[in-house]
Image: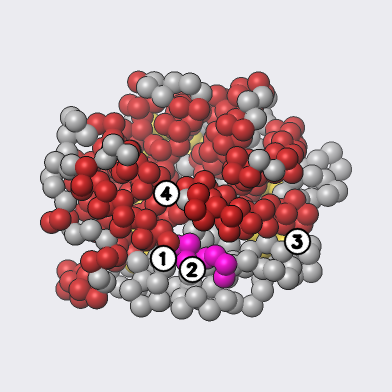
Amino acid sequence: MILKRFQIVASAVAFSAGVASSAVNATPVAADYLRMAAAVESNLRQHILGHWYPASVDTEKGGFFQDFTEDWTRSPRGTKGVVCQSRLTWTAAAFAMHAPAEAETYLAHARHGLKFLSDHQWDAKHGGFFWGIGPTGKPPTPTDAQRLAYGSAFGMYAAATTYKATQDPAALELAKKAFLWFDGQSHDAKNGGYLEVAVTSDETPPPPGEPATNPIGAKADEKSMNSSIHILEALTALYGVWPDPVVKSRLNEMFEITRDKIYADPGYLRLYFTVDWKPRVTEDSYGHDVETAFLLVEAATALGMPEDAKTWRAARNLIDHALKVGADPVTGALYDSGPVDGIETGGPEAVAYKKEKIWWVEAEWLNALLLMHEKFGAETPIYWDAFVKEWDWISNHQVDAVHGGWLKTVNADGSNPHEIKGDGWTECYHQGRAMMEVSERLKKLAGQ
């Protein structure tokens, strides 16, 4: 049934949506890289940016609409979360740098998003970014009123990247203010890293052991992989525009924590930790594994050690492990999560595979595979082969052939669950970044 569905959808999606594997050499040459780059650029504009901008721009209340149905109908105005607002701001700024001919339009979108982050998402009383802002301009729930590490990271990431694109002093001011507040409130000077929930002296911290309605899933007295890798990502961007010694120190700290504490052999990330970095047993999140391979290399490069052997070993192990236990043997697409060793067992701590194909996981998988091909392609064809197979999956199955855009989820049997296209967690940052990174790397491999 799954193969039959693949054939039906593949025939419905024109060749222009992707590049068939038969059209690409096993040993790629410049022409192959350029054909693939053209297909990736087409996907970026048609299925990502073309649906989100300017449709998401809220010219009345500021910021971006984030709720869209399957057919891209905008849902009634709801909460605006710092994660989605930051990611839409970041994507606009990043694309402005990626495509100079379209920069004016996307720089305007980035400035629009930055203004909302500064004027509305920022907590004027206590500092920090609110998790969510309702239609009244205030956090509608206690969860939305929290200032969480994950949200702080994306606020910094958006502001720093907007400054890089615009050179607007207001963007750098917000990036600096966000870092100084976050570092002062959340940095753990004793154990390293950052606490999940930031509170000030006149606020009551959440009780230890309770989740504190934290959307990341970490308890109040825990640290998480998810927040940590995005703090690393944000500090990498911030250091690129503000080479402050403290920022560099924190970047190096989060880089070493990610590589040496969160990463574990044979190539996976542990998800939750005590404050002193003792891990809690959990499943393996394959998408985070492969995303972090890219983020580690990016951070090492920012720190002036792009060829660091220990970093490349960890990054490669993350990809090799995902290929071994996390990739669908039929389609090449990456599963959502599963057991670390790839073996499903019973018992109270059993971990089962979640074999759905999730949009952001597939985007990060594509990007990471090409990164490995660029570095190790002279040694082995496995990364290029997996990259071509994954691109076939994305262009023929993860893309919505009816309504356009990327499907949030493709079920394990290949069916479409007809989900929304946008909400507080579902937007265009992962696939937008992946397409930009992949396009630029393909052109670089082609010698352009």
* Secondary structure found at label 2: helix
Q: Is 54 inside the magenta-drawn segment?
A: yes
Quarter of the figure with residue 6: bottom left
Q: Earlier in the sequence, mark 4 or mark 3?
A: 3
Q: Is residue 198 left or right of residue 230?
A: right
Residue 334: image x %, image y %?
A: 31, 53
Residue 258: image x %, image y %?
A: 48, 31
Give the residue type that dot 1 points to. Answer: His
Give the residue type that dot 3 points to. Answer: Pro
Q: Residues within 10 Å of mark 3 (few under 14, many from 20)?
A: many
Which residue bears the numbered disc 1?
47
Give the residue type that dot 2 points to. Answer: His
Which residue bears the numbered disc 3?
139
Residue 145: image x %, image y %?
A: 74, 56
User: The C terminus lies in which quarter of the figure?
Assistant: top left
Which residue bears the numbered disc 2?
51
* Secondary structure found at label 4: helix
The label on residue 398 is none
Q: Nearer the viewer, mark 3 or mark 2?
A: 2
Look at the numbered discs 2 and 1 and tell me whether their residues touch, using CB distance below 8 Å.
yes
Q: Nearer the viewer, residue 105 or 124?
A: 105
Q: Residues within 10 Å of mark 1 (few under 14, many from 20)?
A: many
The residue under the point 69% across, 43% down is 168
CA separation in Å, label 1 and label 4: 13 Å
Q: Nearer the viewer, mark 4 or mark 3?
A: 4
Q: Residues within 10 Å of mark 2 (few under 14, many from 20)?
A: some
